[in-house]
Image: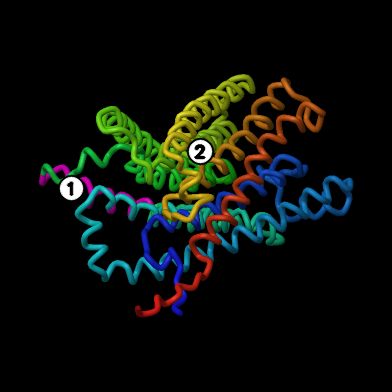
Amino acid sequence: MQPNRPADKYSPLYFLASVGAGGLSVTFFMYIMFWVPKHGTPVPVFEDILAAFTMGSLGMKLAIITAWAGIATFVFLNLKYLVWNLKAFSAFRKTEAFTKLKTTNAETTILAMPLALAMSVNALFVAGIVFVPGLWSIVEYLFPFAMAAFLAIGILALMQIGDFLGRVLTQGGVFDVTAHNSFAQMLPAFALAMTAVGFSAPAAMSANTVVVGVALVGSTFFGVASLTYAALALFTAFNSMLHYGTSKETAPTLLIVIPLMTILGIMAMRQNHGLHETFEVQAAAGETMIFLARLVAVQILFGLLGLVMLARHDYWKSFVFGSETSPGSYALVCPGVALSVLLQFFINSGLVQAGVLTKFSVAYWIVTAIAIAFQVAMIALVVRLNKQHFGRTTVQAVPAE
């Protein structure tokens, strides 16, 4: 008998296991961000959370305990699967399978690595805010290092994109259009967007004009690069899908627009906050509400398209609840997480700020329950996929006849 796991047959798409866990840590941070009162800081920090836990109601205490547990658990899983992937990818680079990968459309799956790296930096920042006392007193010294990290990750992503485009645009005929029948080629745009949203954090949180300015310009560059690449990949993919139909195993990529909207939406929100606080650029609450509503509308439309394709291909039956496995299944986690996070922003930064909803009213909790439902569903999905792909199974030796 020999133990084995589906994950032992490595694919760079396993970096999405780390990305999904990091995203789930952010869904728990939404409890802190929108429910805990803050005092003189852009987001609630350790001291605010501790005060709310000490003086708050039973409901507040339960929410904070849940957030603490959720953030700690999923940041740990995020880092665990990042380290595992970096080790596995290092070994994978020395194999013939990697050499073959670099000659196919699937070369862009390598972009899952900078995507995961950027997600982990974001997750560590969340953990620092929540768990580290006195962090805000030194945060201005940390912002330049954070921006340097995201710049390095962004450059890595651009170099990997350059390798791919340099090959397919100069050699001609090496890009398989028949295999472009999904949104798999939008993964580079996802990586660039994750870099952009991380780069934009100091714009919303720093009090230093130079830091805010650099964060605004840097995040704008990577955000525009992401949108440009996404537009090209999306339209060419649609053309291929109309000609050749959609691919079953890559069907989850049809939902990739959903996390893209959340990440770029948060980037825009952070930029607007920085412009307001540092450069006195005003934005009305109603404008923010409509901006977020448009992003949610795009998410719902692409979500419906993706769900139809997944149902037509019997994807859930085959790869999630069935015996088949595909590393691309982890691409299902990011859309649900992203929808949960953007709904929290839409509710709190949009509807509440515009006066449409009263915070903590019955109506508020009804719509918030939708965001939490997506979060719970994605936790269950992550547990299921981790068991499928990383759980040990035993292959019985076949007896000789």
The disc label shown at residue 400, or none: none
The kind of residue tagged 1 is Gly
The kind of secondary structure the magenta stretch mainly shows is helix
Quarter of the figure that contains the N terminus: bottom left
Is residue 29 in the magenta section? no
Residue 210 shown left or right of residue 132 in the figure: left
Is residue 164 in the magenta section? yes
Circle 2 packing at 10 Å, graded few (<14), some (14-19), many (20+), is many
Q: In the image, residue 83 lies at what x, y percent?
A: 47, 67
Residue 275 shown left or right of residue 195 in the figure: right
**288 w.r.t. 395: above or below:** above
Residue 225 shown left or right of residue 284 in the figure: left
- Looking at the image, can residue 213 be seen? yes
**372 w.r.t. 158: above or below:** above
CA gap, disc 1 and disc 2: 29 Å
Q: Does label 1 or label 2 sit earlier along the sequence?
A: 1
Residue 127 appears in which quarter of the rendering?
bottom right
Q: Which residue is mark 1?
A: 166
Q: Which residue is mark 2?
A: 267
Of residues 104 and 164, the one drawn nearer to the viewer in this rendering: 104
Bounds of the magenta segment: 154-171
